[in-house]
Amino acid sequence: MGYFIKELPEWVVNFNKQRIPDQYFQKTWERKLSEAAYQISDQDDASYEDTWDGNTKTFPHIIDGNSKEISPTFYRQFGDSPFSNELLARFALATIDNEKLGQGKYPDFLAVSFSAPDLVGHMFGPYSQEVQDIIIRTDETIGSFLDELDKRLGLNNILVVLTADHGVAPIPAYARQHNLGGLRMDGLKLRKDMEELLVNRYGALKKGEEYILGLVNQQFYLNEALIREKKLDLKEIEDFVGQQAVRTEGVAAYYTRTKIIAGEISNTDIGQRIVAGFSPERSGNVFLLVKPFVQIAEAENEYNGTGHGTPYHYDTHVPIIFMGKQIKSGVYHEACSPSDITPTIATILEVEPPSGSVGRVLTEALK
């Protein structure tokens, strides 16, 4: 049973009072290695990269929020830099020390999410020099973190698991340059055009009313309350939206909420991935499956950079690395998923896995 405390522990309050990010104001993010080492990556001044919160697209990146004074933009730039990973590792060690993790009778869990590579990847793309550099630096940060764990508790007493929550697509313009057929669809126009099609088919609405509430994460959210009020068939409208969307360049297929709930999705790899990502409380009505290397810009700030969220390999292939005395050294090629981590850890601890666990135990990697 979990719980949340109402107030931060005193040591966290004191940690925050140090205002450690402020110490990085006007710090320069340079390449970690020589410039020649980055020739395996894309050119540094690629036009399709996003601007770094208004900062330059090329090295060096000055973390100053584009101002002579500390500002919210500075903190965003700091979070989007490798230095935020350093702060996170520092806080994780402070957590271990102050909460006395690993020093009691029962096992303790500590989850650390190094999110800066994700943010940098969105802006500059996975083949950018910035991503190459932040991966080099993140590797160094994790190495130093593990060294400190070894000093404090001994790595022989610790099970380490490294994974990621998703992959990433190349920037569409980069994909086109490499003959992969990349395309960035105008999501704002797609939504506007779809609304007009619905009005033409099902009738005009009062001022301020819309059939479509939003296009988010490649999903159309329909105004179900309005559709019920007008006594229209939701299933029919979902299919109409999907059929019209598939006529648009870049859309390969569609899936609807009604069919997912009814269990009518084909038992294909992609179909079941769509089903696995469905949440009755949060998902939309019409899921668009874009073609490979296609992205939908759903907001004004999404016309550069890249994203993720498709069921394709580049978006779903992630590492799973276990390290500990319970693990059999080796490289394993059996199919696996991050959902396998929880039951595997439960097996190592000789406890029941959580009721929501859906993965398998990675027995091939256990001693």
Image: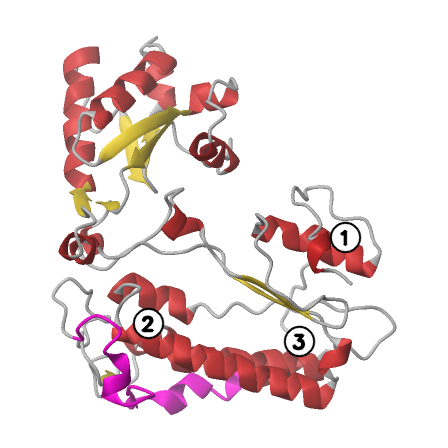
Residue 154: image x %, image y %?
74, 84
Indicate which label's residue lies in the foreground, 3 or 2: 2
Residues shaded magenta: 16-44
Q: Residues within 10 Å of mark 1 (few under 14, many from 20)?
A: few
Q: Label 1: which residue?
A: 1
* Numbered disc total: 3
Which numbered disc, 1 or 2, marks the residue that appears first in the sequence?
1
Residue placed most toward the observer, 153 or 66:
153
Q: Secondary structure at mark 1?
A: loop
Locate residue 70, reporting x and y percent.
Answer: 30, 84
Q: Of the residues shown, which amino acid type is indicated by label 2? A: Val
Query: Which quarter of the rendering shows the C terminus?
Result: bottom right
Q: Which residue is mark 3?
A: 9
Q: CA distance from mark 3 to mark 1?
A: 20 Å
Tell which residue pokes out farthest to the right in this image. Answer: 105
Q: Is residue 271 above or below residue 44?
A: above
Q: Amino acid at mark 3?
A: Pro
Which residue is drawn at the image coordinates 69% and 59% (left, top)?
A: 365
Label 3 vs label 1, nearer the camera: 1
- What residue is disc 2 on? 131
Q: Secondary structure at mark 2?
A: helix
Examine the structure image and report whether residue 304 is included in the region drawn in magenta: no
Image position of 308 (left or right of 331): left
Circles 1, 2 touching at the beta carbon (< 8 Å): no
Tell whether 41 sits left or right of 283. Answer: left
Query: Can residue 100 be seen?
Result: no
